[in-house]
Image (cartoon, rainbow, N blue to C red):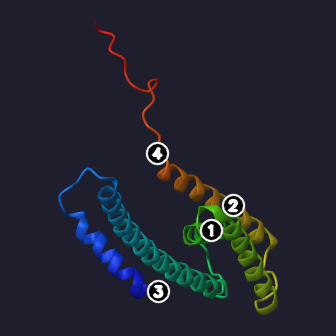
């Protein structure tokens, strides 16, 4: 199947730089060539970006799980604030990896992660180490992180033009 498509794509690419004729076939071939090249480039860029994000998210989650079992000393911030921040980052990374439309999956994974870490701490760490408030703070942080990321992605995809109400008026005339 690929052997059938490659000659057609090569022909489309070669005809792209040919002088423009008025007939519709040449325009559509030229346009199809341009679209094929830009889509392929965007597709591979997106795959590379998602791969990098997946690796970053995996490394972050591994570090988060490892740090969950390090005994606490004198902490700089309370455990609730730490859990909220950590799981906000988890949900941001997961929304970026999974996409804007699957924000609820990212939120679910972050909430399950917070619950699993606290459950594992209650089994393998000293008594009083696992706190229900950490789960609640992690859930709140994950929710805020997911919603902010979805909003930022929506704004970046649909930037709004300056409205006439925000443009300065010339009153000196």
The 10 Å Cα crowd at callout 3, few under 14, some 14 to 19, many 20 or more, is few
| Label total for image | 4
Label 4 vs label 2: CA separation?
A: 24 Å
The image position of residue 29, as x and y in percent, is 33, 63
Q: Within the image, what quadrant is residue 109 found in?
A: bottom right
Sequence-wise, which precedes: disc 1 or disc 4? 1
Asked which secondary structure carries label 1, the reply is helix
The 10 Å Cα crowd at callout 1, few under 14, some 14 to 19, many 20 or more, is many
Q: Nearer the viewer, residue 48 or 43?
A: 43
Sequence-wise, which precedes: disc 4 or disc 2? 2
Tell me if 61 is positioned left or right of 105 in this view. left
Label 2 vs label 1: CA separation?
A: 8 Å
**Picture disc at residue 91:** 1
Q: Residue at x 58, y 68 (%)?
A: 89
Q: Nearer the viewer, residue 124 or 48?
A: 48
Asked which secondary structure carries label 2, the reply is helix
The 10 Å Cα crowd at callout 2, few under 14, some 14 to 19, many 20 or more, is many
Sequence-wise, which precedes: disc 3 or disc 2? 3
Q: Nearer the viewer, residue 19 or 54?
A: 19
**Picture disc at residue 159:** 4
The 10 Å Cα crowd at callout 4, few under 14, some 14 to 19, many 20 or more, is few
Foreground mark, 1 or 4, reads 4
Q: Residue at x 79, y 75 (%)?
A: 131
Rendered position, 60 above or below 78: below
Foreground mark, 1 or 3, reads 3
Q: Which residue is mark 3?
A: 1
Sequence-wise, which precedes: disc 1 or disc 3? 3
* Residue 21 appearing in the image: yes
Q: Which residue is mark 2?
A: 143
Label 4 vs label 3: CA separation?
A: 40 Å
Is the C-beta separation of discs 2 and 1 under 8 Å? yes
């Amino acid at each position: 199947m690929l052997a059938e498509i490659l000659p057609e794509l090569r022909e489309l690419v070669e005809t792209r730089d040919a002088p423009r004729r008025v007939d519709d076939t040449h325009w559509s071939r030229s346009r199809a060539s341009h679209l094929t090249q830009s889509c392929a480039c965007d597709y591979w860029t997106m795959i590379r970006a998602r791969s990098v994000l997946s690796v970053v998210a995996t490394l972050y989650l591994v570090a988060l799980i490892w740090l969950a079992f390090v005994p606490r000393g004198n902490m700089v911030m309370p455990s609730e604030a730490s859990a909220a921040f950590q799981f906000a980052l988890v949900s941001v990374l997961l929304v970026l990896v999974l996409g804007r439309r699957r924000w609820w999956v990212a939120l679910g994974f972050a909430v399950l992660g917070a619950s699993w870490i606290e459950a594992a701490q209650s089994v393998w760490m000293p008594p009083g180490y696992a706190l229900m408030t950490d789960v609640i703070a992690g859930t709140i942080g994950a929710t805020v992180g997911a919603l902010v990321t979805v909003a930022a992605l929506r704004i970046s995809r649909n930037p709004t033009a300056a409205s006439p109400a925000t443009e300065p008026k010339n009153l000196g005339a």
